[in-house]
Image: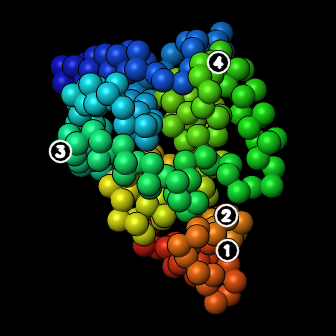
Amino acid sequence: MVGSRASAGLDGYLVETLAATRRFFTGSGTTADTPPPTGTEPISWQVQSLLLSYPDARLLAQLDLLRLAAITLDDPVGGPLGRFIDHVAETSAARLATEYVATFNQPECCLFLAYGTRGRGRAVRRLRETYAASGLRLAGAELPDHIAVMLEYAAAAPDPGEALLVEYRAPVQLLRLGLRDMGSPWADVLDSIWATLPPLVGDEWLAVAGLAAMRPQPERAAPDPAGTPSHIPRQRVMQAQDACR
């Protein structure tokens, strides 16, 4: 019982402390109908959000807090975060920034979850409205469908935020596959996110393949034999159904 109370106290401390690290939103994220966030998922989503943001001096100054938060999480979520935090700590700031830009400039590793969809404009407007309904307002110029923005929203407003992350599981999985194919250290962060979400089942995997087909083809890659305009061919996506759950 004492251990449970201590754990709950640490979780509460981390939720409150991590709320002060928000990069994208102003507002509490709570309304009359939404209680303040509790538990470990808001902790994991805020840590993941920060680690998928541009690796600037502000992020590097927060590594000790992020490491403490990762230690409190169950291994499928916290373990990959700990590995990535170790990578960040062991890599020079200049190299980390260069790797970040080189990695996420690739279409198959796009951080914008509505990118490549026909209705992206509508999706972006809807996301803004969803955030505002939860008492949150975007503070900067980052677009609402950036994965780090959506994760920070989920940390501040867990119920509607989780629903959004579940809705966008296909582009999350596509990003995860792209990072794995590149051997990128950021794949650990996506593995951690994936551990907080329900797996794709059945025809839901078709959405991943369809999104891969719609993404612009990177210049360094030739079209696959089936003509799919993506560095990650449909067959690769479908084969990942079992391997990446």
Distance from the alpha carbon under mark 1 to that under mark 4: 36 Å
Task: Indicate the secondary structure of the residue bearing disc 3.
Answer: helix
What residue type is disc 4 on?
Arg
What residue type is disc 3 on?
Glu
Residue highlighted by disc 3: 90
With 196 as the anchor, is 232 left or right in this view? right
What residue type is disc 1 on?
Pro
The image shows residue 19 at horizontal and vertical percentages of: 43, 18
Residue 26 visible here: yes
Task: Please report the residue visible at 28 percent of the width from the left and 30 percent of the height from the top.
Answer: 60
Residue highlighted by disc 4: 137
> Of label 4 and label 3, which has the lower sequence position?
3
Task: Indicate the secondary structure of the residue bearing disc 4.
Answer: strand
Residue highlighted by disc 1: 229
Of tags 1 and 4, the one toward the viewer is: 1
> Of label 2 and label 4, which has the lower sequence position?
4
Disc 3: CA contacts within 10 A as few (<14), some (14-19) or many (>=20): few
Residue highlighted by disc 2: 215
